[in-house]
Image (cartoon, rainbow, N blue to C red):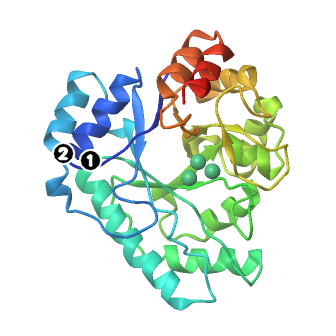
Amino acid sequence: MIIGCHVQMKAPRFLAGSVEEALSYGANAMMLYTGAPQNTRRRPVSEMKLEEAAALMKENGLPMDRMIIHAPYIINPANSVKPEVAELAVSFLQQEIERTHEIGAKYLVLHPGSYTTTDAETGISTAVKHLNMVNVAEDVTVCLETMAGKGSEIGRTFEQLAQILEGLKQPERYGVCFDTCHTNDAGYDINDFDSVLDEFDRVIGLDRMHVIHLNDSKNEKGAGKDRHANIGRGTIGFDILRGIAVNPRTAHIAKILETPYIGSKPPYGYEIEMIRSGVYDPAVLDAMEKSR
Ligand code: FE
Ligand code: FE
Ligand code: ZN
Protein backbone atom coordinates (compact mmCIF):
# COMPACT_ATOMS: atom_id res chain seq x y z
CA MET A 1 0.00 0.00 0.00
CA ILE A 2 1.34 3.41 -0.94
CA ILE A 3 0.22 5.67 1.87
CA GLY A 4 1.46 8.90 3.34
CA CYS A 5 0.31 12.28 4.46
CA HIS A 6 0.80 15.97 4.31
CA VAL A 7 4.15 16.86 5.93
CA GLN A 8 5.84 20.13 6.84
CA MET A 9 8.71 21.69 4.89
CA LYS A 10 10.42 24.20 7.12
CA ALA A 11 13.76 25.49 8.42
CA PRO A 12 16.23 24.17 9.30
CA ARG A 13 15.76 20.71 7.76
CA PHE A 14 13.49 21.62 4.81
CA LEU A 15 12.95 18.67 2.43
CA ALA A 16 15.14 16.36 4.54
CA GLY A 17 12.83 17.17 7.46
CA SER A 18 9.77 16.40 5.31
CA VAL A 19 11.11 12.93 4.51
CA GLU A 20 12.07 12.33 8.15
CA GLU A 21 8.60 13.35 9.27
CA ALA A 22 6.93 11.00 6.77
CA LEU A 23 9.18 8.11 7.80
CA SER A 24 8.37 8.75 11.46
CA TYR A 25 4.70 7.98 10.67
CA GLY A 26 5.54 4.78 8.82
CA ALA A 27 4.58 6.50 5.55
CA ASN A 28 6.03 5.55 2.17
CA ALA A 29 4.73 8.68 0.42
CA MET A 30 4.29 12.35 1.36
CA MET A 31 2.94 15.64 0.16
CA LEU A 32 4.26 19.11 0.94
CA TYR A 33 4.05 22.76 0.05
CA THR A 34 7.31 24.37 -1.09
CA GLY A 35 6.55 27.25 1.33
CA ALA A 36 3.56 28.77 3.12
CA PRO A 37 0.41 27.87 1.12
CA GLN A 38 -1.09 31.32 1.63
CA ASN A 39 1.83 33.29 0.19
CA THR A 40 4.28 33.17 -2.69
CA ARG A 41 7.55 33.67 -0.81
CA ARG A 42 9.77 30.74 -1.72
CA ARG A 43 13.37 29.82 -1.06
CA PRO A 44 15.54 28.52 -3.87
CA VAL A 45 15.54 24.73 -4.06
CA SER A 46 19.33 24.86 -3.62
CA GLU A 47 18.69 25.81 0.04
CA MET A 48 16.10 23.07 0.68
CA LYS A 49 18.50 20.23 1.61
CA LEU A 50 17.46 18.27 -1.42
CA GLU A 51 20.49 15.95 -1.59
CA GLU A 52 19.91 14.80 1.96
CA ALA A 53 16.20 14.30 1.31
CA ALA A 54 16.87 12.32 -1.87
CA ALA A 55 19.45 10.15 -0.09
CA LEU A 56 16.98 9.42 2.70
CA MET A 57 14.32 8.45 0.20
CA LYS A 58 16.71 6.19 -1.67
CA GLU A 59 17.86 4.55 1.57
CA ASN A 60 14.23 3.77 2.36
CA GLY A 61 13.40 2.55 -1.11
CA LEU A 62 11.14 5.46 -2.00
CA PRO A 63 11.18 6.68 -5.60
CA MET A 64 11.05 10.48 -6.01
CA ASP A 65 7.46 10.36 -7.30
CA ARG A 66 6.44 9.52 -3.72
CA MET A 67 7.24 13.12 -2.85
CA ILE A 68 4.19 15.00 -4.08
CA ILE A 69 4.11 18.80 -4.25
CA HIS A 70 0.93 20.82 -3.61
CA ALA A 71 0.73 24.25 -5.22
CA PRO A 72 -0.41 27.03 -2.85
CA TYR A 73 -4.16 27.63 -2.81
CA ILE A 74 -3.82 31.32 -3.61
CA ILE A 75 -3.15 30.33 -7.23
CA ASN A 76 -6.44 30.95 -9.05
CA PRO A 77 -6.17 30.51 -12.81
CA ALA A 78 -10.00 30.64 -13.12
CA ASN A 79 -10.31 34.27 -12.03
CA SER A 80 -11.39 36.48 -14.94
CA VAL A 81 -12.51 39.35 -12.71
CA LYS A 82 -9.11 40.42 -11.39
CA PRO A 83 -6.46 40.03 -14.12
CA GLU A 84 -3.66 40.45 -11.57
CA VAL A 85 -4.84 37.31 -9.74
CA ALA A 86 -4.62 35.19 -12.87
CA GLU A 87 -1.30 36.80 -13.83
CA LEU A 88 0.11 35.82 -10.47
CA ALA A 89 -1.32 32.32 -10.95
CA VAL A 90 0.46 31.93 -14.28
CA SER A 91 3.85 33.21 -13.11
CA PHE A 92 3.75 31.42 -9.78
CA LEU A 93 2.57 28.14 -11.28
CA GLN A 94 5.39 28.34 -13.81
CA GLN A 95 7.91 28.74 -10.97
CA GLU A 96 6.27 25.99 -8.96
CA ILE A 97 6.56 23.62 -11.92
CA GLU A 98 10.25 24.51 -12.19
CA ARG A 99 10.73 23.85 -8.47
CA THR A 100 8.95 20.50 -8.80
CA HIS A 101 11.24 19.63 -11.70
CA GLU A 102 14.34 20.75 -9.78
CA ILE A 103 13.35 18.68 -6.76
CA GLY A 104 12.88 15.69 -9.03
CA ALA A 105 9.30 15.19 -7.89
CA LYS A 106 6.74 14.21 -10.50
CA TYR A 107 3.29 15.25 -9.35
CA LEU A 108 2.22 18.82 -8.65
CA VAL A 109 -1.32 19.04 -7.23
CA LEU A 110 -3.26 22.15 -8.23
CA HIS A 111 -6.73 23.44 -7.37
CA PRO A 112 -8.34 24.45 -10.66
CA GLY A 113 -9.63 27.67 -9.08
CA SER A 114 -12.75 29.70 -8.42
CA TYR A 115 -14.81 31.74 -10.86
CA THR A 116 -15.67 34.34 -8.16
CA THR A 117 -18.51 36.53 -9.52
CA THR A 118 -18.88 35.04 -13.01
CA ASP A 119 -20.07 31.49 -13.71
CA ALA A 120 -18.60 28.01 -13.98
CA GLU A 121 -18.31 28.05 -17.78
CA THR A 122 -16.39 31.34 -17.67
CA GLY A 123 -14.20 29.96 -14.87
CA ILE A 124 -13.41 26.84 -16.87
CA SER A 125 -12.49 28.70 -20.06
CA THR A 126 -10.46 31.20 -18.01
CA ALA A 127 -8.57 28.38 -16.30
CA VAL A 128 -7.83 26.75 -19.66
CA LYS A 129 -6.58 30.03 -21.08
CA HIS A 130 -4.21 30.62 -18.17
CA LEU A 131 -2.97 27.04 -17.88
CA ASN A 132 -2.12 27.22 -21.56
CA MET A 133 0.20 30.16 -20.79
CA VAL A 134 2.30 27.84 -18.61
CA ASN A 135 4.89 25.44 -19.96
CA VAL A 136 4.89 22.19 -18.01
CA ALA A 137 8.30 20.51 -17.80
CA GLU A 138 8.46 17.12 -19.47
CA ASP A 139 8.93 15.13 -16.27
CA VAL A 140 6.19 16.93 -14.30
CA THR A 141 2.49 16.07 -14.25
CA VAL A 142 0.15 18.77 -12.95
CA CYS A 143 -2.73 17.05 -11.16
CA LEU A 144 -5.96 19.06 -11.07
CA GLU A 145 -7.76 18.28 -7.83
CA THR A 146 -11.40 17.22 -7.60
CA MET A 147 -13.01 20.01 -5.58
CA ALA A 148 -15.95 20.12 -3.15
CA GLY A 149 -17.58 23.03 -4.99
CA LYS A 150 -17.29 25.33 -2.00
CA GLY A 151 -18.13 28.92 -2.96
CA SER A 152 -17.42 29.28 -6.66
CA GLU A 153 -14.86 26.48 -7.04
CA ILE A 154 -14.63 24.77 -10.41
CA GLY A 155 -13.70 21.10 -10.65
CA ARG A 156 -16.67 19.94 -8.61
CA THR A 157 -17.68 17.43 -11.25
CA PHE A 158 -15.59 15.05 -13.33
CA GLU A 159 -17.17 16.68 -16.40
CA GLN A 160 -15.76 20.08 -15.42
CA LEU A 161 -12.27 18.60 -14.97
CA ALA A 162 -12.59 16.77 -18.30
CA GLN A 163 -13.56 20.03 -19.95
CA ILE A 164 -10.43 21.72 -18.62
CA LEU A 165 -8.22 18.79 -19.63
CA GLU A 166 -9.69 18.75 -23.13
CA GLY A 167 -8.80 22.43 -23.63
CA LEU A 168 -5.13 22.08 -22.72
CA LYS A 169 -2.27 22.36 -25.19
CA GLN A 170 -0.16 19.88 -23.21
CA PRO A 171 -2.86 17.41 -22.08
CA GLU A 172 -0.30 14.64 -21.58
CA ARG A 173 1.34 16.69 -18.81
CA TYR A 174 -1.87 16.98 -16.78
CA GLY A 175 -3.81 14.50 -14.70
CA VAL A 176 -6.11 14.45 -11.69
CA CYS A 177 -5.81 14.22 -7.91
CA PHE A 178 -8.90 12.55 -6.44
CA ASP A 179 -9.88 13.85 -2.98
CA THR A 180 -12.35 11.62 -1.10
CA CYS A 181 -13.63 14.43 1.17
CA HIS A 182 -14.11 16.77 -1.77
CA THR A 183 -15.88 14.24 -4.00
CA ASN A 184 -18.19 13.28 -1.12
CA ASP A 185 -18.97 16.93 -0.45
CA ALA A 186 -19.45 17.48 -4.19
CA GLY A 187 -22.20 14.83 -4.17
CA TYR A 188 -20.52 11.61 -5.35
CA ASP A 189 -21.49 8.46 -3.48
CA ILE A 190 -18.09 7.48 -2.13
CA ASN A 191 -19.74 4.52 -0.34
CA ASP A 192 -19.76 2.86 -3.73
CA PHE A 193 -16.18 3.68 -4.73
CA ASP A 194 -16.14 1.22 -7.62
CA SER A 195 -19.08 2.98 -9.26
CA VAL A 196 -17.39 6.35 -8.73
CA LEU A 197 -14.25 4.91 -10.36
CA ASP A 198 -16.35 3.67 -13.30
CA GLU A 199 -17.80 7.16 -13.66
CA PHE A 200 -14.33 8.72 -13.41
CA ASP A 201 -13.04 6.29 -16.00
CA ARG A 202 -15.91 7.06 -18.38
CA VAL A 203 -15.59 10.86 -18.08
CA ILE A 204 -11.84 11.40 -17.54
CA GLY A 205 -10.04 8.05 -17.78
CA LEU A 206 -8.73 6.19 -14.77
CA ASP A 207 -5.20 6.30 -16.21
CA ARG A 208 -5.21 10.05 -15.50
CA MET A 209 -5.68 9.67 -11.75
CA HIS A 210 -2.23 9.97 -10.15
CA VAL A 211 -2.84 10.98 -6.52
CA ILE A 212 -5.60 10.18 -4.02
CA HIS A 213 -6.24 12.43 -1.02
CA LEU A 214 -7.68 10.13 1.62
CA ASN A 215 -9.77 12.19 4.03
CA ASP A 216 -12.96 11.71 5.98
CA SER A 217 -15.51 14.53 5.75
CA LYS A 218 -17.26 16.58 8.43
CA ASN A 219 -20.21 17.05 6.10
CA GLU A 220 -22.86 14.99 4.38
CA LYS A 221 -22.61 13.97 0.75
CA GLY A 222 -23.38 16.92 -1.52
CA ALA A 223 -22.91 19.58 1.17
CA GLY A 224 -20.47 21.52 -1.03
CA LYS A 225 -18.42 22.33 2.05
CA ASP A 226 -14.83 20.93 2.18
CA ARG A 227 -14.03 20.29 5.82
CA HIS A 228 -11.74 17.32 6.38
CA ALA A 229 -12.24 14.92 9.28
CA ASN A 230 -9.89 12.35 10.77
CA ILE A 231 -10.21 8.84 9.36
CA GLY A 232 -13.26 7.18 10.94
CA ARG A 233 -14.49 10.39 12.52
CA GLY A 234 -16.52 11.73 9.64
CA THR A 235 -19.49 10.91 7.44
CA ILE A 236 -17.53 8.57 5.12
CA GLY A 237 -16.20 6.34 7.87
CA PHE A 238 -13.28 3.99 8.39
CA ASP A 239 -14.54 0.97 6.44
CA ILE A 240 -15.19 2.92 3.25
CA LEU A 241 -11.86 4.79 3.42
CA ARG A 242 -9.96 1.59 4.16
CA GLY A 243 -11.78 -0.03 1.21
CA ILE A 244 -10.58 2.81 -1.02
CA ALA A 245 -7.02 2.38 0.30
CA VAL A 246 -6.99 -1.31 -0.63
CA ASN A 247 -8.98 -1.13 -3.88
CA PRO A 248 -6.88 -3.03 -6.45
CA ARG A 249 -7.86 -0.64 -9.27
CA THR A 250 -6.03 2.23 -7.55
CA ALA A 251 -3.32 0.22 -5.76
CA HIS A 252 -0.55 1.92 -7.77
CA ILE A 253 -1.71 5.40 -6.70
CA ALA A 254 -0.34 7.11 -3.57
CA LYS A 255 -2.96 7.81 -0.87
CA ILE A 256 -2.22 11.01 1.01
CA LEU A 257 -3.92 11.91 4.29
CA GLU A 258 -4.81 15.56 4.80
CA THR A 259 -6.69 15.01 8.02
CA PRO A 260 -6.65 17.63 10.77
CA TYR A 261 -4.19 17.73 13.65
CA ILE A 262 -5.71 16.77 16.98
CA GLY A 263 -4.79 19.57 19.34
CA SER A 264 -1.24 20.36 18.25
CA LYS A 265 -0.44 16.76 17.32
CA PRO A 266 -0.44 15.08 13.92
CA PRO A 267 -2.67 11.95 13.87
CA TYR A 268 -0.94 10.43 10.85
CA GLY A 269 1.11 7.70 12.52
CA TYR A 270 -2.05 6.19 14.02
CA GLU A 271 -4.20 6.74 10.97
CA ILE A 272 -1.65 5.11 8.65
CA GLU A 273 -1.26 2.17 11.01
CA MET A 274 -5.03 1.66 11.24
CA ILE A 275 -5.46 1.82 7.47
CA ARG A 276 -2.60 -0.59 6.89
CA SER A 277 -3.84 -3.08 9.49
CA GLY A 278 -7.56 -2.64 8.78
CA VAL A 279 -8.19 -2.40 12.50
CA TYR A 280 -9.87 0.80 13.58
CA ASP A 281 -9.45 1.80 17.19
CA PRO A 282 -11.40 5.03 17.83
CA ALA A 283 -9.98 5.11 21.37
CA VAL A 284 -6.54 6.09 20.06
CA LEU A 285 -7.74 9.32 18.45
CA ASP A 286 -10.16 9.96 21.33
CA ALA A 287 -7.24 9.70 23.77
CA MET A 288 -5.26 12.20 21.66
CA GLU A 289 -8.25 14.51 21.85
CA LYS A 290 -8.41 14.27 25.64
CA SER A 291 -4.71 14.91 26.12
CA ARG A 292 -4.73 18.01 23.93
FE1 FE B 1 -5.77 20.34 -2.22
FE1 FE C 1 -7.08 17.53 -1.04
ZN1 ZN D 1 -9.99 20.09 1.11
Tag 1's secondary structure?
Answer: loop
Horizontally, is 287 left or right of 49 in the view?
Answer: right
Q: Secondary structure at mark 2?
A: helix
Q: Is residue 113 above or below residue 60?
A: below
Return the residue nearer the eye: 13 or 277: 13
**Residue 157: image x %, image y %?**
76, 56
3 in relation to 184, above or below: above
Q: Earlier in the sequence, mark 1 or mark 2?
A: 2
Total numbered badges shown on the rendered structure: 2
**Residue drawn at point x = 37 percent, y = 47 percent:** 106
Q: Are marks 1 and 2 in contact (CB under 8 Å)?
A: yes
Using the numbered discs, state the Cα–Cα distance from disc 1 to disc 2 in whole angstroms. 9 Å
Which picture quadrant has residue 66?
Answer: top left
Residue situated furthest front in the rendering: 291
Q: Is mark 1 within 8 Å of ligand 1?
A: no
| Along the line of sight, the residue nearer the viewer: 174 or 269 | 269
Which residue corresponds to the image point at 59% horizontal and 65% vertical from the top-left?
Answer: 112
Q: Which mark is residue 50?
A: 2
Q: Is residue 63 visible?
A: no
Q: Nearer the viewer, residue 43 or 189?
A: 43
Q: Give the x, y percent position of residue 122.
A: 71, 81
Q: Disc 1 residue type? A: Gly
| Crowd around label 2: few <14 · some 14–19 · many ≥20 (10 Å) | some
Left or right side of 239 for 43: left
Mark 2 Cβ inside 8 Å of ligand 1: no
Identity, as a three-letter code, of the amino acid under mark 2? Leu
* Label annotation for residue 16: none
Q: Is residue 192 above or below residue 111?
A: above
State the residue at coordinates (75%, 41%).
218
What percent of the width, then of the height, locates residue 170? 47, 66
Where is mark 1, residue-wise? 104
